[in-house]
Image: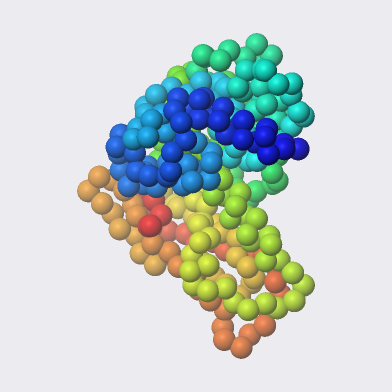
Amino acid sequence: MWNSKKKAAALLALSCALAGSGVAAAAFSDVQGSNNQSIVSSLQEKGIINGVTATQFKPNQQLTQPQAIQMLVNAFDMKGPETASGQVWYTQAVAAARANGLSIPANLKASEPVTREQFAIWLHQAIDKTGQYPATMMMVVFQDQKSISKEASNAIQNLVNMNVIPRSSVGQEFKPKAAITRMDAATWVYSAVEMVERHKQLQSGDDTSTSPQPSEGEQMGTTPEMGISSTADGKQKVTLHVELPNPGYNLKIDNVKLTDDKRAIISYSLQQPEPGMMYPQVITEGTAATIIPAGYTPELAK
């Protein structure tokens, strides 16, 4: 376990690794879009990443292998054996990653960027170390599917089905051998952390007695996983899956809005149990499905 000095040193190293001193969470001037700003700010507040400077995140900059490892170690709170002082800044992170089952190469190069498929492998291994999670088992295909290595393909399939890698990227080029950008890495890690935390919250509410119903806000904090399949007439069937606190809850699709930029924005709600009814506190799966036209990318309403 890390002592306070080791932890402080690791945080300082992370600041250096991501090319800048740590700063208070704030909107970076070079991060475009409110969603991206929210992702970066959330990870920064949790101590997972820092900006390159006080005002810039450098979202399109390549992520090096040591930086990627440090990000994953921070995101999933990995612990490892103590390392001797005087080592390079990422020594402790590499030791922790290896101790937690990540396939870190022996000839790690500090300046070498990590590819998109390699980061997917490491991220998938990091998630696996925290537990098992439900996912829609749908075969996803990218335009350059043949360029993805066999080892990476399994990880990428699972990450897409867990909504860690955005489903909107399916059908496009994955670019497995290209270096992953800081923004793409942050987006994947953010989604992974949210999924793990959401699952832990559901598990913590599992007991043998009937407990008070969660508030509407707590219910809506449970985001469904999304699966896509083709129908016989060439349309797309979108199925939402979500873990519910007990059998009294139901998942419902309320509306589908088709936009001019070919998005299908799906609004959903979680229906509360009937008043006065008693249900065992057993986590159950709720599902709901809808049909959208071909060529549209499904998204969940914010």
**Is residue 182 at least partly visible in the picture?**
no
* Corner quadrant of residue 198: bottom right
Rendered view: 22 above or below 146:
below
Residue 101 image offset from top left, x and y in percent: 72, 30
State the image coordinates of residue 37 (x, y, percent, origin top left).
36, 44
Q: Can you give x and y, in whole percent of width and height, for residue 129 in the image? A: 70, 39
Q: Nearer the viewer, residue 97 or 211?
A: 97
Tell me which residue sits at (67%, 66%) in the image: 205
Furthest-front residue in view? 5
Quadrant of residue 72 in the image? top right
Give the residue furthest to the left.
260
- Left/right of residue 293 with respect to residue 146 in the rendered view: left
Q: Is residue 253 left or right of residue 149?
A: left
* Residue plotted at (48% across, 69% down): 217
Q: Is residue 32 above or below residue 291?
A: above
In this view, the residue in front, 47 or 286, is 47
